[in-house]
Image (cartoon, rainbow, N blue to C red):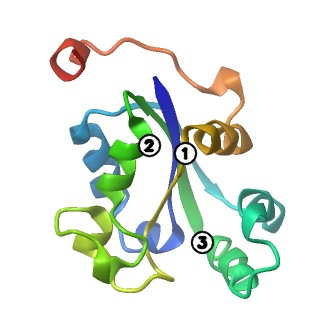
Amino acid sequence: MERTLILVKPDGVQRGLMGEIIGRFERRGLKLIGMKFLQMTPALAEEHYAVHKGRPFYDALVAYITSGPVVAMVWEGNDAIAAARSTIGATKPAEAAPGSIRGDFGMEIGRNLVHGSDSPENGMLEAAIYFSDDELVNWSRVTDSWIIE
C-alpha cells in the first residue's frame, strides 16, 4: 500500500472546503490513516518546502502556507499517489480537469487548495514531517473488499 501526504492549504480551510476535499478522497476509495488540524510554523514550512529553497517563489510559498491553518492527512491505498493526484488535478487550476478539486474550486496557481505528494518516496518522507509512526492508525475498513481486488 502506498501512502500520500495531503494538505488542505489555508485557502481551502478559509473557504470552508475541508469536508468537501476530505470527502473526495474518501469517495475515491483511499483510506485515511492520520489527520491533524494545525497552524504551520515557518520552520515546519521550510522543512516541507526544502526542495524549493532558492527558487524565486520560495519566500512567498512559505508566507502563504503559514498564513492560516492547514489540515495535514495521510491517505493509504493501492496507487495512492496517482489516485490522489488525479483527484487533486493539475497544479494550475485553469488546466485541471473538471471534477478534480482544483478544476472545480481553483482559479490561480498561488491558491490551489491542496498539496499532494508526488512520489511514493516523497509520500513517506512528507508524512514523517507531520506524523510519527504511532500517530498513524492501522485499521481495517469493512468496505475494502468492495474497493480493492
The CA distance from mark 2 to mark 3 is 26 Å
Residue at numbered disc 1: 119
Instruction: Identify which residue is drawn at 72% across, 30% down.
Output: 132
**Badge 3 vs badge 1, beta-carbon distance below 8 Å:** no
Q: Earlier in the sequence, mark 2 or mark 3?
A: 3
Query: In the picture provided, is 12 more to the left or to the right than 28?
Result: right
Q: Is residue 140 left or right of residue 118?
A: left
Q: Earlier in the sequence, mark 3 or mark 1?
A: 3
Residue drawn at the location 33% of the way across and 43% of the way down:
83
Q: Amino acid at mark 3?
A: Gly
Q: Is residue 126 above or below residue 10?
A: above
Which residue has dot 3 on it?
68
What SS does tag 1 mark? loop
- In the image, residue 133 sits, relative to residue 81, either above or below, namely above
At numbered mark 3, what does the secondary structure look like: helix, strand or loop? loop
**Which quarter of the image is occupied by the C terminus?**
top left
How far is mark 3 from mark 1, CA to CA? 26 Å
Q: Earlier in the sequence, mark 2 or mark 1?
A: 2
Q: Residues within 10 Å of mark 3 (few under 14, many from 20)?
A: some
Q: Residue at x 26, y 33 (%)?
A: 29
The x, y position of residue 107, in whole percent, is 34, 85
Tell me how many marks there are.
3
Q: Amino acid at mark 1?
A: Ser
The answer to whether mark 2 and mark 1 are in CB contact below 8 A is yes
Q: Say which amino acid is labelled 2.
A: Ile
Disc 2 designates what residue?
81
